[in-house]
Amino acid sequence: MRRALVLAALGTALLGGACGTRARPYRFASPMLATADVPPLPLRAPPAPPRPRPELANREANAIRVVSAPQIREASAAMAEAVTAAPAAQPEARAALPAPHRLPDGAVVPALHVPADLRARVGYRDKRDPFAVAIEWSRALGRITDGATSTDLLTWAESSSRLADPAAIALPGDLLIFDHATSDLEADLIAVVIDRDARGVTEYVYLGGGVVRRGFVDIARPATRRDPQGLVVNTYLRHGKRWPANGTHYLAGELIAHVVHTR
């Protein structure tokens, strides 16, 4: 009986101690996941600075030597002045250089006897109207053309039965008319045919952006840039600075509109 009373009292004491509230909370070795927030450990004191050693200070003081910088010689100063003055003379020397791809003043332009002579002018700059230049080339080759504008040229070619479909074979000296090449207008670019190779690709020369250029076109493959051998089939003809709209075409085979026979 006494033993049972002792065990019951001991169990009550243990149960009350387990369920009771402690005045000082437990401190765990590691935080519980997503529940406990343990304060950080206290910071350690910084290490004490080393004690000065007089023998090392005397040794370093004796090792220091003051070296004076050498004086600038007169020749170096004169050279510095020459280098400073050089940029002022540079624009004059640059202005004396010939402009790229531009015929010098007074130069004699080679005469045109056959359409292939136009290849020698590719790359040269010319600020004149592209239409007027193409008509001048055609007349220099002895071809028949008429019209002061592209519209007049097309009207004359249609009335004289010289206007052909873009699929027609263009012979050397004929004119090619392209639509929407430099603007939103029709017939805004004109070119002179030079040759036609065994692939059926037509070679031509035109003035675009103030520069004489050479291009290629094949109406049978309008969207082909190069053939399997890497040779050009259609040239990127657009050279304007406007942001193109959706669906804009660029290749010569997509922009060619007419062929004007000049024989």
Image (tube, rainbow, N blue to C red):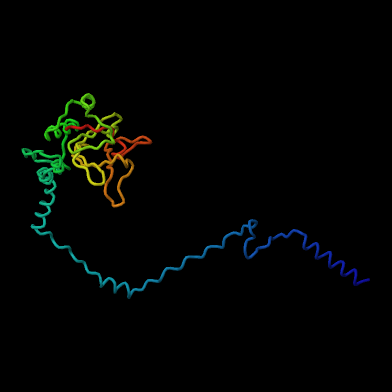
Total marks in image: 0
Q: Quadrant of the N terminus?
A: bottom right
Q: Quadrant of the C terminus?
A: top left
- 24 vs 258, left or right, is right
User: Is residue 81 or residue 195 the one in the foreground?
Assistant: 195
Residue name at image x 29 percent, y 52 percent: 229
Q: Quadrant of residue 180?
A: top left
Residue 199 vertical placement versus 246 (above, below): below
Residue name at image x 25 percent, y 72 percent: 63
Outermost residue toward the right in this view: 1
- How far from the left and from the top, in percent, is residue 198? 24, 46
- How far from the left and from the top, in percent, is residue 149? 20, 26
Residue name at image x 65 percent, y 56 percent: 35
- How far from the left and from the top, in percent, is residue 192? 19, 36
Q: Quadrant of residue 121?
A: top left
Q: Quadrant of residue 65?
A: bottom left
Residue 175 vertical placement versus 58 (above, below): above
Residue 60 vertical placement versus 131 (above, below): below
- How far from the left and from the top, in percent, is residue 147? 18, 25
User: Is residue 13 or residue 127 the one in the foreground?
Assistant: 127
User: Is residue 105 or residue 15 the one in the foreground?
Assistant: 105
